[in-house]
Image (cartoon, grey):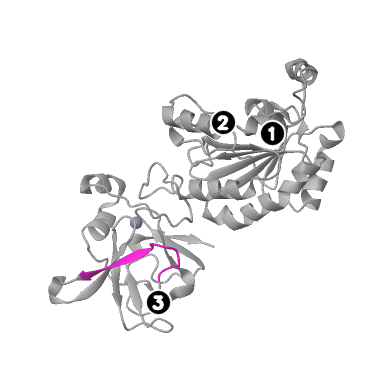
């Protein structure tokens, strides 16, 4: 029998007493979760524009409400984080306290998601809203966070400010925010792990609002995004340097030995400079001596690059473009090293590198 701890304060005491007297207090939170399917279906069909606070369903972006700020507390495992700074990342906000065994039961799953999806753009934040004075003690919180093997950021919420801002009533409550900082999913208690993981995957795959050529804050970092991007030349021109535009949209070629990444031997990932699609891993980079960064294979991520027959300049070559935004990247030749025998000859200017 699962039993979620309920924080009862002020009016809730009166409401609770009433419910208890009415015999409805046995599984109050479970019963509200078990909304008949027909009601949910009708609500979806209405396409309401008002903010939606439904639980255990993925709320459509159009009716999702902006998540309240994470109010100031002491941060463990991280400097202070703000949701604004986390724009472009999916955020799991876990309201917990170390003394709650239901909370502790959810930790292996939260830790697994953090390990699996952090590199793909997920940030997990534990909001530690204590139940007893013992749980408010900073030394105790630090010790327990370490003992429980939590390496994601935790912020203390001793005055329940963040708890109240989010309208939380029970430990643990998991809230999942999309890349625009909107509340898209809320679950109270243990369980629903598969459903929540699917929500995380879905939100990680959602398009971020803008894909500027020279800023990285708004992009889905590390995520191979498959939605196509179609923009006019005018739009691309606004987002790119003239040199980038010439190569990436007009299929030009940078001069050999002039690019930033020809000689780059750092470990990391190369992304499309226009849309941040993941393209190449440094493990497949080799010194071709041509003066352009060369790789023997694109990343295993789905839809990294696409090949197009190029018959310009009196040659028959195979052009390589970004599978997501069709930006010209370079060409592929069949004189590369093992294991593929291919040489992806790329323009540095079409690439963005992120060190591992
Ligand atoms: Zn691209």
Asked which secondary structure carries label 3, the reply is: loop
Q: Residue at x 81, y 52 (%)?
A: 147
Residue 66 locus on image (x, y percent): 52, 30
Image position of 189 (left or right of 68): right
Which residue lies under the disc numbered 2? 54
**Label 1 CB sits under 8 Å from any ligand 1 atom:** no
Residue 202 locus on image (x, y percent): 49, 48
Mark sitting on residue 30: 1
Mark 1 Cα-neighbour bin, 10 Å: few <14, some 14–19, many ≥20? some
Give the mark, 1 or 3, whose residue is nearer the N terminus. Answer: 1
Mark 2 Cα-neighbour bin, 10 Å: few <14, some 14–19, many ≥20? some
Task: Please name which of the two marks, 3 or 2, marks the residue nearer to the observer.
Answer: 2
Q: Quadrant of the C terminus?
A: bottom right
User: 116 above or below 202?
Assistant: below
Q: Residue at x 47, y 70 (%)?
A: 282
Report the residue that reaches farthest toward the left.
314
Give the mark, 3 or 2, whose residue is nearer the N terminus. Answer: 2
Q: Are marks 3 and 2 in contact (CB under 8 Å)?
A: no
Q: Residue at x 77, y 41 (%)?
A: 2
Residue 309 locus on image (x, y percent): 21, 71
Res. 344 in view:
yes
Image position of 332 (left or right of 106): left
**Residue 257, magenta (yes or no):** no
Quadrant in the rendering for residue 161: top right
Task: Please name which of the two marks, 1 or 2, marks the residue nearer to the observer.
Answer: 1
Which residue lies under the disc numbered 3? 296
**Label 2 CB sits under 8 Å from any ligand 1 atom:** no
**Residue 303, magenta (yes or no):** yes
Q: Quadrant of the N terminus?
A: top right
Which stretch did the figure color magenta? Answer: 298-309
Residue 99 locus on image (x, y percent): 82, 40
């Amino acid at each position: 029998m699962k039993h979620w701890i309920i924080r009862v304060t002020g009016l809730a005491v009166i409401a609770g007493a009433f419910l208890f007297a009415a015999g409805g207090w046995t599984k109050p939170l479970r019963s509200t979760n078990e909304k008949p399917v027909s009601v949910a279906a009708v609500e979806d069909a209405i396409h309401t524009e008002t903010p939606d606070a439904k639980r255990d369903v993925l709320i459509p972006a159009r009716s999702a409400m902006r998540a309240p700020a994470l109010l100031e507390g002491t941060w463990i495992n991280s400097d202070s984080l703000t949701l604004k700074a986390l724009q472009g990342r999916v955020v799991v906000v876990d309201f917990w306290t170390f003394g709650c065994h239901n909370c502790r039961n959810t930790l292996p799953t939260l830790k697994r998601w953090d390990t699996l999806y952090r590199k793909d753009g997920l940030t997990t934040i534990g909001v530690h809203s204590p139940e007893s004075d013992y749980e408010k003690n900073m030394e105790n919180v630090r010790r327990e966070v370490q003992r429980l093997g939590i390496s994601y950021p935790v912020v203390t919420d001793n005055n329940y400010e963040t708890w109240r801002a989010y309208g939380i009533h029970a430990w643990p409550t998991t809230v999942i925010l999309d890349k625009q900082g909107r509340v898209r999913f809320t679950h109270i208690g243990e369980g629903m792990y598969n459903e929540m993981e699917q929500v995380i995957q879905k939100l990680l795959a959602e398009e971020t609002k803008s894909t500027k050529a020279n800023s990285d804050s708004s992009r889905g970092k590390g995520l191979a995004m498959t939605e196509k991007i179609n923009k006019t030349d005018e739009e691309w021109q606004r987002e790119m340097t003239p040199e980038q535009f010439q190569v990436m949209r007009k299929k030009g070629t940078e001069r050999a030995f002039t690019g930033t990444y020809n000689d780059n031997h750092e470990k990391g990932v190369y992304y499309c400079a226009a849309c941040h699609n993941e393209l190449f891993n440094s493990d497949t980079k080799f010194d071709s001596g041509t003066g352009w960064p060369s790789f023997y294979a694109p990343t295993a991520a789905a839809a990294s690059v696409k090949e197009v027959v190029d018959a310009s300049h009196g040659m028959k070559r195979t052009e390589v473009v970004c599978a997501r935004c069709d930006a010209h990247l370079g060409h592929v030749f069949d004189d590369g090293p093992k294991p593929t025998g291919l040489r992806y000859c790329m323009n540095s200017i079409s690439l963005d590198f992120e060190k591992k």
